[in-house]
Amino acid sequence: MKYIDVIYGGREYLLLFEYASGYCEIQEKNNQYNIKLVHVCELEQLVRLDF
């Protein structure tokens, strides 16, 4: 499964799941046990350019 890279609080996270309510489960990239529930409006999408 491919996850979306996002930024929350200045740190990189993976977007695991988005609920219909607008809340999302995100996981810190370097710590698989650090999972947060945040609203989608608090996230920025990290854009990576692959050449």
Image: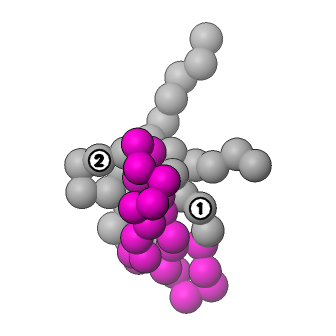
Give the residue at mark 2.
11
On residue 43, which mark appears? none
- Give the quarter of the image for residue 43: bottom left
Precedes in sequence: disc 2 or disc 1? 2
Decide if residue 6 is in sight here. no
Residue 24: x and y in percent read 51, 73
In the displayed image of the protein, which residue is found farthest to the left? 10
> Which residues, given as a range, are shown in magenta?
18-39
Q: Horizontally, is 36 left or right of 22 in the view?
A: left
Residue placed at 60% from the left, 72% from the top? 18
Residue 33: x and y in percent read 45, 60
Q: Secondary structure at mark 2?
A: strand
Does the magenta portion include 25? yes
Residue 26: x and y in percent read 47, 63
- Give the quarter of the image for residue 42: bottom left
Report the amino acid beneath label 1: Leu
**Above-or-below relation of 39 to 34:** below
Q: Horizontally, is 48 left or right of 17 in the view?
A: left
Give the residue at mark 1.
16
Q: Nearer the viewer, residue 27 or 46?
A: 27
In the displayed image of the protein, which residue is found farthest to the front? 33
Residue placed at 59% from the left, 18% from the top? 50
Q: Secondary structure at mark 1?
A: strand
In the displayed image of the protein, which residue is found farthest to the bottom? 21
Looking at the image, do the residues carrying marks 2 and 1 touch, with CB atoms under 8 Å apart?
no
Decide if residue 17 is in sight here. yes
Residue placed at 61% from the left, 80% from the top? 19
Report the amino acid beneath label 2: Arg
Residue placed at 61% from the left, 11% from the top? 51
Q: Number of labelled discs?
A: 2
* Marks 2/1: CA–CA distance: 15 Å
Q: Residues within 10 Å of mark 1 (few under 14, many from 20)?
A: some
